[in-house]
Image (tube, helix red, strand yellow):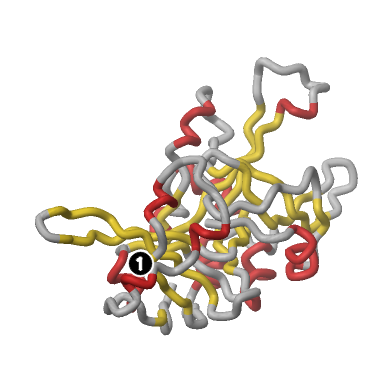
Amino acid sequence: MSVQERADLVDLYNATAVGDELAPSYNVAPTTEVYAVLEHADPNTDEVDRQIRNLRWGLVPNWTKDPTIGNRLINARVETLAGKPSWRGPFRRQRAVIPAAGYYEWAPRQRDATVSKQPYFLHPTDPNGVLSFAGLYELWRDPSKDKSDPTRWLWTAVIITTDAAGPAGDIHDRTPLILPLDRVNAWLDPTRTEPAQIYEVLDGIVLQPLAIRPVSTRVNRVGADGADLVEPLTEHLDEPLQLTLTARAA
């Protein structure tokens, strides 16, 4: 997953930026901060404001005593959102969009007697396109910090996944659930609180084509970053996975 320029996202989602701007990254890892678009109600006025905030990737449920559980809760299967304890509260009240320029998936690759995993970069066909991942967010209060300390609240997020189809399904059986822009308002709508209403937003989603290309295995290294990570590997360009993702139903 990679981070976009915040000013562009403010315009795209008609949102207000909150907090410091993140440095662009071509290799965003779980437990690091990402941008999230959400509808947040002011506790003093109850007015709802659409914001872009920095949230840590890896959801920490508000009921847990151990915030490190978020290190594992990075993806939520769409089929479990209404029932799983970690998801069901945020699913009803705290939905988000996680913007990204693209994301990586890995496919097994055999060369001679060695089997390894080849990373692929999946991204919009428009070079300036943005993927709107459906997500959830949560607030966890650190009991060790004073009530007057604004840092006592930890904001975290999880990315929702669904079944992959087409060429993306040849790489991995799951994929982030990508919202078309015309579904974003309904997904973030805080008045939708019943699971059936919310799932209606996800019915019948058809994606615009995604481009898929093999990239360097350097992306496997935590801390590796830079535009070269998404450059295509020319020695793999003739492989069958170099196709275009056509459509997927959520």
Q: Residue at x 66, y 53 (%)?
A: 24
* Rendering quarter of residue 243: bottom left
Q: Residues within 10 Å of mark 1 (few under 14, many from 20)?
A: some
- Pick the residue in front: 205 or 29: 29
**Left or right, residue 140 beside residue 14:** left
Side of 198 relative to 238 (left or right) = right
Is residue 72 visible to the viewer in this orientation of the structure? yes
The structure residue drawn at horizontal position 42% and vertical position 43%, both measured from the top left corner, is 221
Above or below residue 192? Residue 88 is above
Q: Position of residue 46 (x, y in %)?
A: 84, 49
Image coordinates of residue 7 in percent, x first then y, are: 79, 61
Residue farthest along the left direction in this orientation: 113
Furthest-front residue in this view: 235
**Is 57 left, or right, of 8 in this rendering?**
left
- Quick one: 93 or 115, which is closer to the camera? 115
In which quadrant will I find the C terminus? bottom left
Residue occupying the point 62% across, 66% down: 187
Residue 165 visible in rendering: no
Percent position of residue 56, x then y: 60, 41
Residue bearing mark 1: 163
Give the tally of numbered discs.
1
Q: Quadrant of residue 197?
A: bottom right
Identify the secondary structure beneath mark 1. Answer: strand
Position of residue 242 relative to residue 196, above or below, is below
Q: Amino acid at mark 1?
A: Asp
